[in-house]
């Protein structure tokens, strides 16, 4: 099995005490394509995980939005991380292994680990692995974790939920893993924000702006999106990713973690009280958001829900990585959408006032055949 723990070379910019990436290093391969070419290929049938979008050093105005939102929401992010961490620790205790889903889940996993370390003086193992829509979870990585931590309970972690595609993929993958190997995995996904109502383990169900959604690799340990490509990933390999060491000067990954973590002493009591309320009023995932997505797709004549990306985080990704058609916005005056308005103006994307939804905003992807 491929090992990423090469003592001669660091993978990712996080400290190894914060997270270990179980990913095959593909840094030496040219996998990037332009947004337009990737969109054409994806809409023509190529799976999105076979290639990567080009990642640039974020321009100054992106960084300004990131820093403003981080200053404004650092305590809210810390509180949500604390609420989730309290739930995880009280359910699974010291027997937990945190398994974040690269890459949006990685900083969240680190924050949860640090909160538990501070509050309960317990250093939980934390790995970051790949899960890919329609392809499943990296089973080689799961086997690696189970082999190294026998008898431990895995807790999967992600950043937020949109319409629940990854939650559904995780459940499907856990069932397939049990069928193949006879080992039961807990498919409950822990997230900071669950606006799609896809899980029972969340910090909030408010669709707010998690600052790390404003940037790509430069807030995620300089690690790319994960890659599953038959030419590069063998049957015994971990899924792959690139380490963008050339962007080191723009990296704010550890700064983001440190700034949010500094709020933990302030929010500890509030996080515990919120956890106690959630225990008494535990709400399972209903996937209510998917009903709204289906309605939007019908209303705007969109043939596949893959072209509808609800929530602040997913809308941000549409504007950064895809070819957006329209942005639906519940309240254009919301502080959570300032960066969305900036990105939409930059890319000349229409903003549609759409108050009848539970999400803050929603990104609609353009069919490439419709491009002029």
Image (cartoon, rainbow, N blue to C red):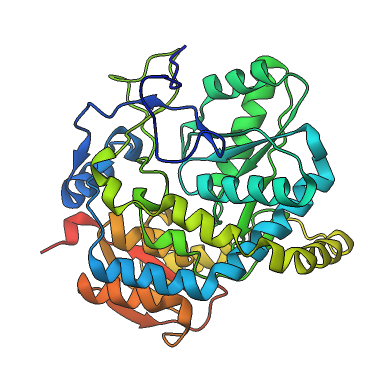
Q: Is residue 222 above or below residue 371?
A: above
User: Splitting the image into 4 quarters, where does residue 332 fall?
Assistant: bottom left
Judged left or right of residue 314, residue 173 is right
**How far from the left and from the top, in percent, is residue 86?**
77, 53
Q: Is residue 284 visible?
A: yes
User: In which quadrant of the rendered view does residue 305 lie?
Assistant: bottom left
Residue at the outermost left position: 372
| Above or below 141: residue 241 | below
In the picture, measured across the screen, residue 217 lies left or right of residue 147, that is left
Residue at the (30%, 20%) spot, across then down: 232
On the image, the x and y values in percent for residue 109 come to 59, 45
Does 196 appear above or below 355?
Answer: above
Give the total number of marks visible in the rendering.
0
Give the farthest residue toward the bottom. Answer: 333
Q: Is residue 164 left or right of residue 184?
A: left
Q: Residue at x 22, y 52 (%)?
A: 56
Q: Position of residue 283 (x, y in %)?
A: 78, 60
Q: Is residue 228 left or right of residue 169?
A: left
Q: Is residue 286 visible?
A: no
Q: Residue at x 63, y 65 (%)?
A: 263
State the quadrant of the C terminus: bottom left
Quarter-wise, where is residue 63 in the image? bottom left
């Amino acid at each position: 099995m491929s090992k990423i723990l090469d003592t001669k070379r660091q993978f990712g910019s996080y400290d190894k005490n914060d997270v270990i990436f179980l990913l095959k290093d593909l840094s030496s391969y040219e996998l990037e394509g332009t947004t337009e070419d990737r969109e054409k290929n994806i809409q023509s049938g190529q799976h999105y995980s076979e290639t990567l979008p080009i990642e640039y050093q974020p321009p100054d105005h992106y960084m300004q939005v990131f820093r403003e939102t981080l200053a404004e929401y650092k305590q809210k992010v810390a509180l949500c991380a604390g609420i989730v961490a309290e739930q995880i620790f009280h359910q699974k205790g010291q027997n937990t292994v945190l398994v974040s889903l690269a890459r949006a889940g990685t900083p969240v996993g680190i924050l949860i680990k640090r909160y538990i370390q501070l509050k309960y003086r317990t250093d939980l193992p934390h790995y970051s692995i790949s899960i890919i829509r329609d392809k499943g979870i990296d089973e080689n990585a799961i086997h690696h974790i189970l082999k190294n931590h026998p008898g431990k309970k895995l807790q999967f972690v992600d950043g937020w939920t949109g319409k629940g595609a990854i939650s559904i993929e995780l459940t499907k993958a856990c069932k397939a893993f049990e069928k193949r190997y006879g080992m039961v995995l807990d498919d409950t996904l822990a997230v900071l924000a669950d606006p799609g109502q896809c899980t029972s383990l969340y910090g909030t169900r408010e669709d707010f702006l998690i600052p790390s959604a404003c940037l790509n690799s430069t807030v995620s340990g300089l690690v790319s999106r994960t890659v599953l490509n038959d030419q590069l990933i063998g049957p015994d390999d971990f899924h792959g990713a690139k380490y963008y060491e050339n962007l080191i000067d723009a990296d704010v990954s550890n700064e983001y973690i440190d700034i949010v973590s500094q709020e933990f002493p302030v929010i500890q009591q509030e996080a515990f009280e919120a956890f106690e309320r959630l225990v008494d009023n535990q709400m399972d995932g209903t996937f209510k958001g998917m009903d709204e997505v289906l309605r939007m797709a019908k209303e705007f004549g969109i043939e596949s829900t893959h072209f509808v990306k609800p929530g602040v985080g997913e809308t941000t990704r549409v504007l950064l990585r895809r070819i957006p058609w329209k942005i639906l916005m519940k309240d254009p005056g919301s502080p959570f959408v300032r960066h969305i308005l900036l990105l939409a103006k930059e890319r000349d994307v229409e903003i549609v006032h759409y108050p009848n939804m539970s999400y803050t905003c929603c990104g609609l992807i353009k069919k490439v055949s419709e491009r002029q």
